[in-house]
Amino acid sequence: MEKQPDHPAGSEPSETAGGLDRFIPFQIYRIMAKAASVASADYAKLGISVQEARLLMLLLERPAIRAGELSDAACIEASLLSHMLRHLAAKGFIHRERDPAQRRSVQVFLTERGEAVARDCMALSAAHQNMLLAGFDARQIDLLRATLDAMYANVSGLEQAGSPWPAMMKTGG
């Protein structure tokens, strides 16, 4: 049985043909950097960062989530999350309580004020998404979502398994 390539049909493994402007990770980074610039200014008016806005929106969707789960869902390192939660608590947007079922865990809750700010963040986030998707039809949006889901699945778990990329890279010797 012939081994299947680790890259899409018709693409080179390096996938930098055409320069960085056509390199998908670079394209994603550029898009998100531009979008984050706009979002940062919008969320700053609420006194929070883009990452803190993401936390508030997750808390709106998932009340009483454990801090560890929040860290995973937001893709934010635990030490940075702790700092951000302290900032949000100082602003009166959240409060934390020990999980009665697991005393070593902390649950995070929105306050009434935090819920209002989280709803503002949701509205801003919807406007940001509309900006990103301007000119797309429903089929293109569904395809983009499916593609992004597949890409996320491809990278999920790499932190625990270790990066496969060093083994794929050619050495110069």
Image (tube, rainbow, N blue to C red):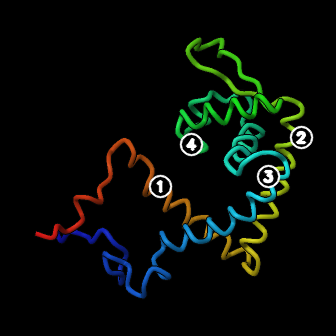
Image depth: mark 2 or mark 1 in front: 2
Question: Is residue 39 placed above or below 139 in the rendered structure?
Answer: above
Q: Looking at the image, do the residues carrying marks 3 and 2 touch, with CB atoms under 8 Å apart?
A: no
Place of residue 72 in the rendered image (x, y in percent of width and height, measured from the top left): 55, 39
Quadrant of the image containing the N terminus: bottom left
Badge number at residue 16: none
Quarter assignment of residue 19: bottom left
Question: Is residue 155 placed above or below 170 in the rendered structure?
Answer: above
**Residue at left 73%, top 73%?**
133
Question: Left or right: where does residue 62 sit relative to residue 10?
Answer: right
Quadrant of the image containing the C terminus: bottom left
**Residue at left 86%, top 46%?**
119
Gap between marks 4 and 1 measured at Cα: 18 Å
Amino acid on which the number 1 mark rests in the picture:
Ala
The residue singled out by tag 4 in the image is 76
Amino acid on which the number 3 mark rests in the picture:
Ala
Counting residues from the N terminus, which is met first, the one under dot 3 or under dot 2? 3
Gap between marks 2 and 1 measured at Cα: 33 Å
The residue singled out by tag 3 in the image is 44
Gap between marks 3 and 4 measured at Cα: 19 Å
Amino acid on which the number 4 mark rests in the picture:
Ile
Badge number at residue 153: 1
Counting residues from the N terminus, which is met first, the one under dot 4 or under dot 2? 4
Depth order, front residue of 123/40: 40
- Callout 1: few (<14), some (14-19), or many (20+) C-alpha neighbours within 10 Å? few
Counting residues from the N terminus, which is met first, the one under dot 1 or under dot 3? 3
Counting residues from the N terminus, which is met first, the one under dot 4 or under dot 1? 4
Image depth: mark 3 or mark 2 in front: 3
Question: Left or right: where does residue 18 sit relative to residue 64?
Answer: left
The residue singled out by tag 2 in the image is 116
Amino acid on which the number 2 mark rests in the picture:
Ala
